Amino acid sequence: MIIAFIGLGNMGAGMAANLVKAGHTVRAFDLSAAALERAEANGCSTFPTAREAATGADAVVSMLPNGAIVRSVYTAEVFGAAPAGALLLDCSTIDVATAREVAGAAEAQGYAMLDAPVSGGIGGANAGTLTFMVGGTAEGFARAEPILKAMGKAVIHAGAPGAGQAAKICNNMILGGTMIVTCEAFALAEKLGLDLQTFYDISSVSSGQSWSMTSYCPVPGVGPQSPADNGYQGGFAAGLMLKDLKLALEAGAATGVPLAIGGRAAELVVYGETTTGAE
Ligand code: NAD
């Protein structure tokens, strides 16, 4: 297929490279010249605007920073340039309301649009092992699945337009809460005189177990390799965690769901971002 790829940053670069590896022709656009150079090195052809990249494409995939940018790229550039009937897949993490609004506008223009945010981070994007949570019609999902499978290990239809974003922000709110409480538990265990490896051996097979403990353990030398083993460098940036928590809090406010732990997690991530490790 001919696929336009818009937004080839930390995540999009590896995703587009995997589409090339799967045999697709990838037409790339990004505002950053460095991103376009890397895309070319990975076998994409590059274009000076999103409009030109989308022209003649069977499908458009985007991996952009936020909802306002997604709205403007699709409404000002992609709509009208991509041929009628083209499949539009936005893989960015954005708010549910904007995802629904842009999908509705796309449908009115004769496109099938799905929200398909991901879990798995930059490592998963490079390795082609992302999890995609997809919102849109069953027909759209059936068309999208083979494209997304070239970039991921799991592709799950979450429901109607916006459902992929809803699943993403609820999932990441769980991550925000469990990551912080896992750090607190290890700090407390240490002060109580427990050997941290022993505590891990116990809790990782007990009811305190979670992804934050067994895949991303915050203690150096304990559990699997994680940013803790690398001086806490790299990994899922606090700024991105905060972005996802804020999207969850906005959705909670819009739907009247109290999010006490999600809210506290957001406050602590802000605090962590604005203080040094010593504090
Ligand atoms: P990034 O900032 O590295 O990449 C975004 C890219 O979009 C940049 O290259 C930027 O130049 C480009 N861009 C911005 N505005 C544009 C425009 N108008 N037209 C074309 N290109 C434009 O960010 P990222 O880490 O790749 O994240 C992308 C999305 O994936 C975000 O929505 C993020 O929340 C989500 N996400 C990120 C991770 C992660 O671990 N990094 C994990 C899951 C989901």
Image: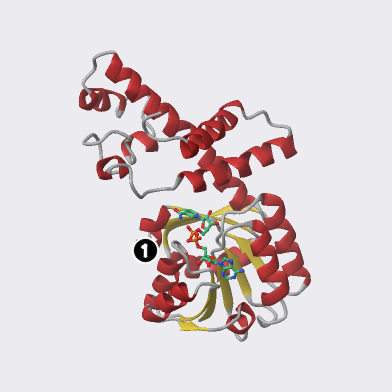
- Of the pair 220 and 53, the residue shown nearer to us: 220
Q: Residue at x 38, y 25 (%)?
A: 208
The image's colouring method is: secondary structure
In the image, residue 112 lies at what x, y percent? 67, 69
- Of the pair 145 and 264, the residue shown nearer to us: 264
Where, by quadrant of the figure, is residue 150 drawn?
bottom left
Where, by quadrant of the figure, is residue 217 drawn?
top left
Q: Is residue 250 left or right of residue 129?
A: right
Task: Judge: label 1 CB < 8 Å from ligand 1.
Answer: no
Q: Residues within 10 Å of mark 1 (few under 14, many from 20)?
A: many
In the image, residue 77 lies at what x, y percent? 68, 76
Q: Quadrant of the C terminus?
A: top left
Task: Name the residue carrying label 1.
Answer: 126
Relative height, residue 94 to residue 9 (above, below):
above
Where, by quadrant of the figure, is residue 263 drawn?
top right
Relative height, residue 25 to residue 115 (above, below):
below
Q: Residue at x 68, y 59 (%)?
A: 68
Work out whether residue 270 can be spotted. yes
Q: Amino acid at mark 1?
A: Asn
Q: Secondary structure at mark 1?
A: helix
Q: Residue at x 63, y 51 (%)?
A: 163
In the image, residue 162 lies at what x, y percent? 66, 53
Considering every residue shown, the one lying at the far right of the view is 108
Q: Is residue 110 left or right of residue 114?
A: right
Q: Residue at x 21, y 21 (%)?
A: 195
Work out whether residue 150 can be spotted. no
Q: Is residue 258 left or right of residue 121?
A: right
